[in-house]
Amino acid sequence: MKFYRSHILLGMSETSIEAGAKKIELALKSELSKRNLQDEIDVLETGPLGFFAKGVCLKVYPENVLYENVTVEDIPELVEEHFLKGRPVKRLLATTTRVEAYDFNYKERNVLENSGIIDPEDIEEYIGVGGYEAWEKALLKMKPEEIIAEVKESGLRGRGGAGFPTGLKWSFTAPIDSPEKHLVINADEGEPGTFKDRLIMEGDPHKLLEGMMIACRAFGANKGFIYIRGEYKLCIERLKHAINQCRSYGILGQDIFGSGFNLDFDIKVGAGAYVCGEETALIESLEGNRGNPRFKPPFPGVKGLWQTPTVVNNVETIANVPTIINKGAEWYKSLGVNGATGTKVYTLMGDVAMPGLTEVPMGITLRDIINKYGGGMLRGKKFKGALVGGAAGVILSDKLLDVKMDYESLKEYTAVLGSGAIMVMGEEVDMVEMLWSILRFFRHESCGKCFPCRLGTQQLYNIICKIRDGEGKEEDLESMILLSDAMVKSSFCALGQSPYMPIKSSILNFRNDFLKRIK
Amino acid sequence: MYQEIFKKYEPTKDNLIYILHDIQDNHPQQYITEEAVLSVSKYLNVPINHIYGVITFYGMFSMKARGKNIIRLCESPPCYLKGCDNIYRKLKEELNIKQNETTEDGLFTLELCACLGVCGNAPVMMINNDIYGDLTEEKVVKIIKDIKGEK
Ligand SMILES: Cc1cc2nc3c(=O)[nH]c(=O)nc-3n(C[C@H](O)[C@H](O)[C@H](O)COP(=O)(O)O)c2cc1C
Ligand code: SF4
Ligand code: FES
């Protein structure tokens, strides 16, 4: 290995590429060779750096300097000043809050521990930081039952929205005697405001693959699929590449590590339908059908893909597994609180100073997430509310800023953690507008299979339009709650049950916004 | 004429969606023709009505000829909060078309879509395979100009 004096990490994600990251990489490399520094300074592509500065960011090690908003024009000066003369370019340095949030962000990471640090396109780098050790341990030193027991003990719960205990899910499928079983990774990520799975896959695709391997071993599947939404081009590319690397290293394939265990993965691409995130609709889509949900039971764990026992898990859920196997359930449980163990990846957006993602132990308060990781409110705005859990989530008021973010604590306030999307709203946001936008979303995404949802989402949209146009009556608010509650009771899948939460919480917490439009 | 594409996929129904993606991406007007549906039906031995059903279900497929550049603007709540409606208005004005229409020169089609998973940079749109975030009205005008320039 070559020895470099400094490493420049350049976060490559869909957004930084849009901001010109590729051009900057080229400019950096050519400027470095012009100055004959190419053997001293290394430029590394890495995954998303984990927060959204405006523009392209560079992190320089070992100096630990963070630059933001770098443009191609800045490169000559940057190379001359920093790398030739050793003087960081002040004008491009990231603000202190951003640096703090960045450092803070990396302290407590688990799922994202390598993201933004290693090159996601190089399996050697993943192996270099201890990657695939957990897979080797699970395959050669543990019995499948022991893997399941460890994951059960860790308390890991599904991160796709419903929070179902992962070990328990596997334990239903494990004992079934079937010639074929499947693991399907749900990477459809359609919940508005959620982009954590994208960043996990872009930043550290091998982490997901390693978790998948361990899961397959645990409940006895020889084939895994990743169902990924068609819009996530970079993820698709990186995962394909990562799977090929695993095959050529013998980490996937026949008789892996001489264990006699065979395993292979494949990527399947969606085509733009939110309902396909629902596990049975996803299976229908995988089979080449319209993504209409199936009747449960039988659950996919018993009869899923092509009628075989199939476990469907979210990307983030599975990305937690390698660390649990490596460090043990006890360590995992030491993070988090209250029946919610481990860490959670949140995506933060809206009226915060630094939108982006962060991974923190379960049970941190909303206030801390906004202030410590999000850099506080945007331009000092006053906090009005936050939509937590995406369109299917709840709108919390400032009274709940200090509630701990975990399954149980939120349940007390009939709120949900959902996918971990947090959309922060400043004082001037009108909740009528927000609810209108949410209901427009559901009206569009209802798959039309069952009438309560097909007609209900349209009717809810009609009512909110009426209110928005100033023609509503106060009774309309109650009608929306009643109607959406009836949909909870009668809809075929969870999509039709989803409008209730945002409707109820916005009317309850921000009734005045609605009344203003009515009178 | 679709043999090149078919060669890449086993003739099983679960490949339907990928074949359709492939056919659509390879058509200069980015859509799936009736003729294509017939060929796929033969190749996979799947009824035509099933294929129509699938095409109409998924937002990314179209059976109408579209432009060279497909603009998909996100209208989900986080983008709405950041003013995607103004961006939409500007796009319509700039291109002089409405939702799902194509400009006369065949360069642009304007579509609305749900969350693209880039909400940290709302408002967001995709043009073909590229993401454009932190949109402002000025930025949108420039993006359109740039694309027109490089045709
Ligand atoms: C309408 C709808 C959309 C969903 N979208 C997703 C999604 O995008 N990603 C996801 O992981 N789970 C989604 N889910 C939840 C899945 O049905 C399922 O519970 C989850 O993938 C299970 O994985 P987990 O146990 O690891 O969380 C959705 C559910 C519904 C009803
Ligand atoms: S609840 Fe809605 S999305 Fe679910 S099956 Fe019924 S119509 Fe389809
Ligand atoms: S809400 Fe527009 S990209 Fe997510």
Image (cartoon, coloured by chain):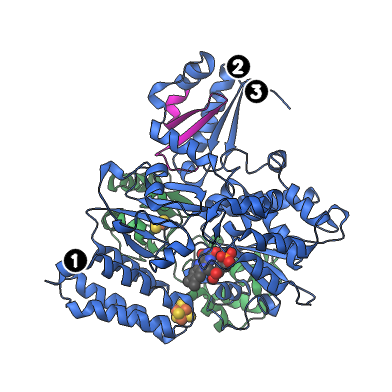
Chain colours: A blue, B green
Q: Amino acid at mark 2?
A: Asn
Q: Find residue A293 and report its horizontal and vertical position in percent.
A: 53, 79
Side of A298 where A409 appears, left or right: left
- Can see residue B58? no
User: Which mark lies nearer to you, 3 or 1?
Assistant: 1
Of residues A133 and B45, the one nearer the viewer is A133
The residue drawn where x is 39% and y is 52% is A366
Which residue is identified by label 2?
A36
Q: Which mark is residue A470?
A: none
Neighbour class for label 3 at 10 Å: few (<14), some, many (≥20)?
few
User: In the figure, A189 relative to B119: above or below?
Assistant: below
Q: Chain of mark 3?
A: A
Which residue is identified by label 3?
A4
Which residue is identified by label 1?
A512
- Decide whether residue B150 is among the magenta residues: no
Q: Which residues are magenta?
A: A49-75
